[in-house]
């Protein structure tokens, strides 16, 4: 499964089976976490036993309390931390999909109960539930492409392909509070329009856009 196939197959899953992730897959996830932490200067952590991370009433109502494991998205506090968390966290989410696992970005969780290491100067931004879903989730409704991008004149094919994948990016409460601007033939600007976890969303969107467009884009701007 390549990245585009993973994007097309992956949907947020909130209800999980009582099944632990196999040791070999745990090893692969931890290796990927180490790789992404070095690449993104982050402190992402795979926590095999989610424990009481999702014991809040809202989490239980959503079904997230059934998630066997959790990824804590931690990093040294910086202006671009949330965007990097979204960008590299989504790389991890799509990798998990290739392993046959399901995930859900979750901003609501018990920060006092999650077994994450948060060092001095670091911040716990968001969590990702991970495990084997009771189902594969459902596609989310999306705004029209014209509402989420700006391009002078006709849009090049690579830009439209990037936008196709950007439209499939998970965003908090499906808000899609972003705009992708084509400034000239090659320059892209990713605009955060504000909202809950919108900076995390922007990092996720940038990664999806890159996969569709087939080219790496500069870090998203505020």
Image: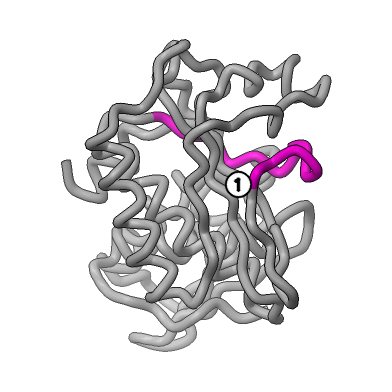
Q: Is residue 104 magenta?
A: yes
| Circle 1 Cα neighbour tier, 10 Å, few/some/many (<14 / 14–19 / ≥20) | many
Of the 4 image quadrants, the one containing the C terminus is bottom right
Residue 99 percent across, percent down from the top left: 25, 36
Q: Is residue 13 magenta?
A: no
Q: Main secondary structure of the magenta part?
A: loop
Q: Which of 173 and 108 is in front in this view?
A: 108
| Lateral position of residue 85 relative to residue 120, left or right | left
| Lateral position of residue 210 relative to residue 117, left or right | left
Q: In which quarter of the image is residue 10?
A: top left
Q: Quadrant of residue 105?
A: top right
Of the 4 image quadrants, the one containing the N terminus is top left
Q: Which of 75 and 193 is in front in this view?
A: 75
Query: What residue lies at 69% left-to-right and 34% top-to-bottom?
Result: 53
Residue farthest left in this picture = 1
Name the colour scheme.
Answer: one colour
Height in image: 2 above or below 203?
A: above
Query: What residue lies at 28% left-to-right and 33% top-to-bottom?
Result: 23
Residue 164 percent across, percent down from the top left: 37, 51
Q: Can residue 96 be seen in this view?
A: yes
Height in image: 120 above or below 179?
A: below
Q: Nearer the viewer, residue 89 or 114?
A: 114
Query: What residue lies at 67% left-to-right and 64% top-to-bottom?
Result: 199
Residue 208 percent across, percent down from the top left: 40, 57
* Residue stretch in magenta: 102-115
| Lateral position of residue 153 relative to residue 106, left or right | left
Q: What element carries label 1?
A: loop
Query: What residue lies at 69% left-to-right and 58% top-to-bottom?
Result: 125
Residue 35 percent across, percent down from the top left: 33, 66
Q: In which quarter of the image is residue 40?
A: bottom left
Residue wearing tag 1: 171
Q: Can residue 142 be seen in this view?
A: no
């Amino acid at each position: 499964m390549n990245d585009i196939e993973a994007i097309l197959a992956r949907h947020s899953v909130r209800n999980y089976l009582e099944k632990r992730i196999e040791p070999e897959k745990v090893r692969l996830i931890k290796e990927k976490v180490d790789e992404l932490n070095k690449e993104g200067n982050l402190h992402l952590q795979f926590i095999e036993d989610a424990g009481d991370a999702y014991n809040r009433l809202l989490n239980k109502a959503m079904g997230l309390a059934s998630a066997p494991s959790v990824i804590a998205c931690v990093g040294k506090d910086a202006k671009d931390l949330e965007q990097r968390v979204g960008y590299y966290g989504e790389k991890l989410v799509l990798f998990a999909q290739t392993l046959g696992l399901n995930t859900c970005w979750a901003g609501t969780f018990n920060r006092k109960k999650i077994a994450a290491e948060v060092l001095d100067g670091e911040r716990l931004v968001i969590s990702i539930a991970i495990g084997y879903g009771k189902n594969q989730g459902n596609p989310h409704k999306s705004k029209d492409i014209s509402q989420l991008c700006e391009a002078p004149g006709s849009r090049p094919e690579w830009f439209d392909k990037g936008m196709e994948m950007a439209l499939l990016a998970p965003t908090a409460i499906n808000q899609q509070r972003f705009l992708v601007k084509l400034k000239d033939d090659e320059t892209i600007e990713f605009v955060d329009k504000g909202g809950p976890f919108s900076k995390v969303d922007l990092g996720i969107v940038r990664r999806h856009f890159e996969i569709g467009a087939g080219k790496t884009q500069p870090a998203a701007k505020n």
